[in-house]
Image (cartoon, rainbow, N blue to C red):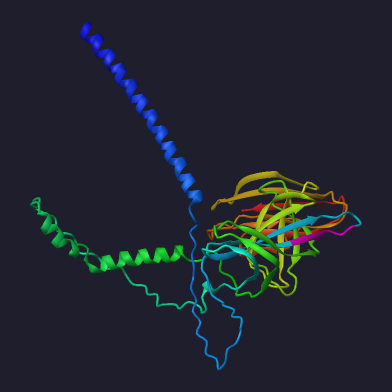
Amino acid sequence: VGLLSLISSEMASVQREVLDGQKRLREVDKEIKDLGKQLSAVAPKRIQRTEVKVFVTADMPLEATLMVHYHVSSASWSALYDARLTTGTKTLAPKLLFTRRASIRQRTGEDWSGVALTLSTTRPNTGSAAPKLSVLTVDFERPRPPEPVPMAAPEAESDAAVRKKKPRVGGRNRGMARSEVQRKIAAEESMPTVAAAPFQALFKVEGGVNIPATGSAKTVKLAEGELKPKLSIRTVPIMEPKAYLYAEVTVPKGVPILPGRVSLFRDGTFVGRGSLPALAAQEKHKLGFGADDLVRVRHSVESDKRGETGLITAARTDTRNYKLTVKNLHARAIDVTVMDRMPVSANEDIKVDLIGPTNPTQQDVKDKRGVLAWESTLGPDEEQVLSLIHIS
C-alpha cells in the first residue's frame, strides 16, 4: 500500500510539472509571435526596383525630359454594370439608368498612386489569328493480341533489375501520350474564361487613381447614361405560375458592352444579379428583373383521356387538354410571351398533334423541338385564355 501511494504521489507531481511546462511553452510561443510582429513593423518594406539605362548622343549640352513606357504583367480589369429600372406609371414611360464600372486589380510589385488611368477593351491574350484545324481521321479499332497467361508465378527480381527494365514498361509512346494529355489539360485550364469579338474602346478615368499592389479590387465608375427600355412579360406556366418582367435595351452608339456581371434594381429595390454577354453598338438585349406580381398566371389540366381505337389493329390515343390564363393588372398595356411545349415523337409509329382555338406564333423556339410561344399585347386589366389539346 505504501509503494502504491508513493507511486501515485510521484505521478501526480510529474503531471503537474508537465502541465507547468506546457504552460511555459505557450507563453514562450506567444512572446516569439509578439516579437515577430514588432520586427515586421520596424523592418523596411520589400521594394522591387527596375533600372533603365538610356544612352543619348548630342552635339551640345542640353536639358530634356524623358518619358519611359513599359509593359507590366499581373494587371487586369473586368467590367461591372448597374441597371436601375423605373417601371413608370400610366402617364410616365419606363426608363433605365445604366452605369458602367471597372474592377481593377494589379500585382506588379509597385503601388499605383495618383496615376492617370486609361482602360482598354482589347484582349491580346486571345491571340491574333484563328486556330488551325488538323486532319481528323476515323478508323476501325485494331484488335489487341491476347496477353500470355503465365504458367507459374515469376521469380522476384532484384531492385536493380526492376530499375533497369522500368523505362521499357509501357513503351515510349505510352509515356509520350501521357505527357501529351497532361500538357493538353494544363493548356485548357490556362485558357481565358471569356473570348469574344475584338471590340476596341478606351476608357480614360478622370483624376488620380490609387491602386495598391496587393491584388485587392479597386472599383471605379466609367460612364452613366439613361436608356429607353421596352418592357415585356415572359411566363412558362407549365413550369411555374409566375410572370417575369424583362426590359429590352439597345446598346448606345460608339462603345460596346463587354462581358461582365450586372446588378439589377427595379423601382429602387435590388432584385438580383445577372450577366451580360459581349454586345456590339446598336445591338439589342433583354434583361430579366424578376417576378412581376401585377401579372397573374394560371395553368390547369382540363382533361386527360386515354383510349384505344380499331378492330384488327388497335391504336392507343392519349388526349390532354390544358388551359393557360394570363391577366395584366398593370395600368398600361404590355407585351406578353407565353411559353409551353408539346411532346416530340421519337418513333414513326407515334404521332403527336396540337389543336386549339389559338395557334402558337412560334414553333421550335430557338431550334428547340416542341417548344411553343404565343406572343400578344394585353391591355390594362385584360385577360388571355389559351386552350391546348395534345393528341398522341
Total labels: the figure holds 0
Q: On screen, 16 above or below 39? A: above
Horizontal and vertical percent position of residue 104: 61, 62
Q: Which residue is more in the foreground, 125 or 372?
A: 125
Residue visible at 88% across and 54% down in the picture: 89
Does 348 sit left or right of 31 as displayed?
right
Residue visible at 64% across and 75% down in the picture: 200
Q: For residue 62, what is the image quadrant? A: bottom right
275 magenta-colored: no
Does 378 sit left or right of 111 as displayed?
right
Q: For residue 207, what is the image quadrant? A: bottom right
Check the picture and name the quadrant holding the N terminus.
top left
Residue visible at 52% across and 87% down in the picture: 56
Q: Which residue is more in the foreground, 340 or 266?
A: 266
Does 372 sit left or right of 216 as displayed?
right
Considering every residue shown, the one lying at the far right of the view is 91
Horizontal and vertical percent position of residue 55: 50, 85
Considering every residue shown, the one lying at the far bottom of the view is 59
Horizontal and vertical percent position of residue 194: 56, 65
Residue visible at 14% across and 55% down in the picture: 149
Q: Which residues are magenta?
A: 92-98
Q: Taking the image as drawn, is residue 205 in sight?
A: yes
Q: Taking the image as drawn, is residue 364 in sight?
A: no
Does 321 sit left or right of 27 as displayed?
right
Q: For residue 114, what is the image quadrant? A: bottom right
Q: Which residue is more in the foreground, 159 or 298?
A: 159
Considering every residue shown, the one lying at the far front of the view is 61
Q: Which residue is more in the foreground, 204 or 358?
A: 204
97 magenta-colored: yes
Horizontal and vertical percent position of residue 315: 57, 52
